[in-house]
Amino acid sequence: MVIRSKKILIEKLTGVHSSKKSYYVALKNKINELLEIKRDWEVTFSAVTDLLVFINQDYEIQRVNQAATDFFTMPEEKVVGAKCYQIFYGREAKCNPCLGDQVLQSQKTSYQQSRTRYNRVLDIFAYPAFTEQDEPYGVTYYAKDVTRFVDSIKLVSMGEMSAGVAHELNSPLTAIVGNAQLLLRESDPDNPQHQLIKDIHSSGIRCQRIIKNLLTFSRQDEFSFEDVNLNDVVDSALALATYQIEKSRIELLVNKHPDIPKISGSANSLEQIIVNLLLNARDAVESKFQAGGKNGTIGQITLDTRLHPEGELALVEISDNGCGIEQDDIPQIFNPFFTTKQSGKGTGLGLSVSLGIAQAHGGFIDVQTVIGQGSTFSLILPLKKADCESEES
């Protein structure tokens, strides 16, 4: 009887052991299966060349693919957890109207085309995500960069018109400026008409400058590229703009990264961008302090050159403590002839021309701004491939 009981006990224990072993084997196989599914899903998710972004109901980004991190030039850990309106538009408050709200409320797919950060145009398709109880818990954004297509249509027609107008105006303006110069040489400075002639001459010069910008705008790809030291370009731009900034009682701080590799570009054209951004910063600072009745207050402009943390990009950042830009104006500031300056102080071509030059160099211009506190404009340019590889090695 004892032997029989012992035999039964051994059989039961062996059965339990066998059952546990089968359970752990099945569990291990299931985990491996899930890991394989997860890996396949991640490979597929990252293989999509357009942007994929998933946000929750609090507008926080939960998941992005590689195309999205490349587009925003940020590592995934900085994008995930941030608000979608911060990453897409550089805003501090929710968009109005909000595409995410529209999808969550209607529980239907929605679409919009919008101009986002870096002045890029995205076709955005938003899809609602549901729980097993059919309750919405987030939104998936599928976004395609259509900037080149949208801008090419607009720029071709605008460029043709600009070139035609510029050439038509150039000839009479040359005669006006030339004759004004001759009259200035022959007139006595004490003559009351001398100042009138001087005004005609300066106005003609200003018109010629506008025409030059129009021609640059209409021929944005016609540049002679060579190896360029970005810090040298900055020095040349500062030589042109420093006096005008300091004359306005604005402090100028310059910090240059000593080891920026050379880039392929047009030094004169890049210098034009930097000068334009510096003078825009000066105007913003002047506008703020004059509007507040603080003419004696010294504003501040900071220029920094540095390498992008993600590599392969060089940055020229120009920051000011001026008036800032209204959120509603940000999508328009790079449009031709749009300006927030007072009448007679701006043509609305500076940023448009600057963006065209940056894009012709394979780069772009980013803007960060807080109304009443100031703005930061960043000229972002790709490094030469050979220099990138040497940096990595």
Image: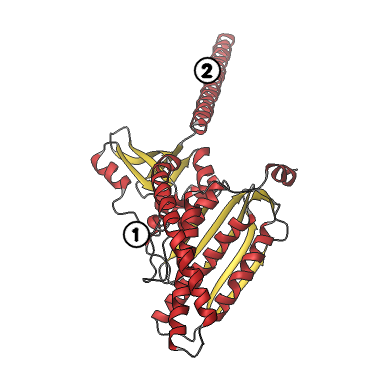
Q: Quadrant of the N terminus?
A: top right
Examine the rendering and report whether any part of residue 144 can be seen.
yes
Quarter of the rendering containing residue 21: top right
Q: In the displayed structure, does residue 130 sit left or right of residue 262?
A: left
Q: Which mark is residue 238?
A: none
Work out whether residue 272 or residue 204 is closer to the camera in this orientation and state it.
Answer: 204
Q: Position of residue 367 (x, y in %)?
A: 48, 58
The residues tagged by marks 2 and 1 sit, at their Cα atoms, a distance apart of 67 Å
Q: In the displayed structure, does residue 111 sit left or right of residue 116?
A: left
- Residue underneath mark 1: 328
Q: Position of residue 98 (x, y in %)?
A: 31, 50
Query: In this figure, which colouring scheme has been used for the structure?
Result: secondary structure
Q: Amino acid at mark 1?
A: Asp
Q: Amino acid at mark 2?
A: Ser
Query: Residue at position x 70%, y 56% from top?
Result: 229
Q: Position of residue 176 (x, y in %)?
A: 45, 68
Examine the rendering and report whether any part of residue 83 can be seen.
no
Secondary structure under tag 1 reads helix
Residue placed furthest toward the front? 186
Work out whether residue 391 or residue 329 is closer to the camera in this orientation and state it.
Answer: 329
Is disc 2 surrounded by few (<14), some (14 to 19) or many (20+) residues within 10 Å?
A: few
- In the rendered view, tell whether residue 174 sits above or below residue 380: below
- In the rendered view, tell whether residue 153 sits above or below residue 274: above
- In the rendered view, tell whether residue 223 sits above or below residue 33: below
- Residue underneath mark 2: 19
